[in-house]
Image (tube, helix red, strand yellow):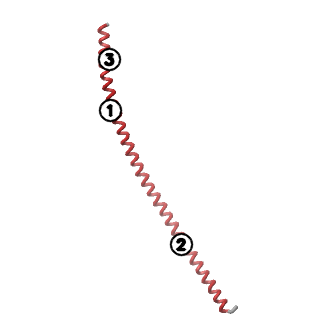
Amino acid sequence: MSFEAINTISEAEGSAKDMKSAAEAQAKERIAKAETAGKAAVEAALVKAASELKELQAKADEKAKAEAADLSATTENKKASLRARAEDRIDKAAELVVERIVNS
């Protein structure tokens, strides 16, 4: 083999090594960027999920309070109705007791 051929091969090998090193460095850089972007995406998703959870909890609390208020109002109405009926019956019962005592 001639000296020129050996030089050409050596230069080609050196160039290939340089290209390989550059490709490896570029791959490592891309991996680092992808990891950074992935971590940022995960963090953003966590923040969004926490925000949505807080919003859903607030809506659930609001709905529960409204339902409790409705139930309380319904209960108060039933209580007033029962009290009115009981008061009517107490008067009638008192009249019956008095009548029996008087008629005895």
Residue type at the position of mark 3: Ala
Badge 2 local density, few (<14 within 10 Å), some, or many (20+)? few
Sequence-first tag of 2 and 1: 2
Residue denoted by label 1: 77
- Which element type, helix, strand or loop, lies under badge 2? helix
Say few, some or many: other residues with alpha carbon within 10 Å of mark 1 (under 14 / 14 to 19 / 20 or more). few
Disc on the earlier residue, 1 or 3:
1
Q: Residue at x 44, y 57 (%)?
A: 48
Q: Nearer the viewer, mark 3 or mark 2?
A: 3
Question: Residue type at mark 1?
Answer: Asn
Q: Which mark is residue 24?
A: none
Label 3 and label 2: CA atoms lie apart by: 94 Å
- State whether residue 11 is above or below residue 69: below
Report which residue position mark 3 lands on: 93
Q: Residue at x 34, y 27 (%)?
A: 82
- For residue 2, side relative to residue 85 (left or right): right
In this rendering, the answer to whether 11 lies above or below 25 is below
Q: Please tell me how many numbered marks the rendered image carries.
A: 3
Q: Position of residue 84 (x, y in %)?
A: 30, 26
Secondary structure of the residue carrying numbered label 3: helix
Give yes or no for contact between labels 2 and 1 (Cβ–Cβ under 8 Å).
Answer: no
Q: Position of residue 2 (x, y in %)?
A: 68, 92
Foreground label between 2 and 1? 1
The three-letter amino acid code for the residue at tag 2 is Glu
* Direction from residue 91 to residue 14 in the image, left or right: right
- Which residue is pictured at 32% across the width and 28% down the height? 81
Q: In the rendered view, tell whether residue 74 sits above or below residue 32.
A: above
Q: Residue furthest top?
A: 104
Q: Please provide percent x and percent y for residue 25.
A: 56, 75
Q: Residue at x 63, y 83 (%)?
A: 13
- Locate the N terminus and report the quarter of the image it occupies: bottom right
Q: Which residue is mark 2?
A: 29
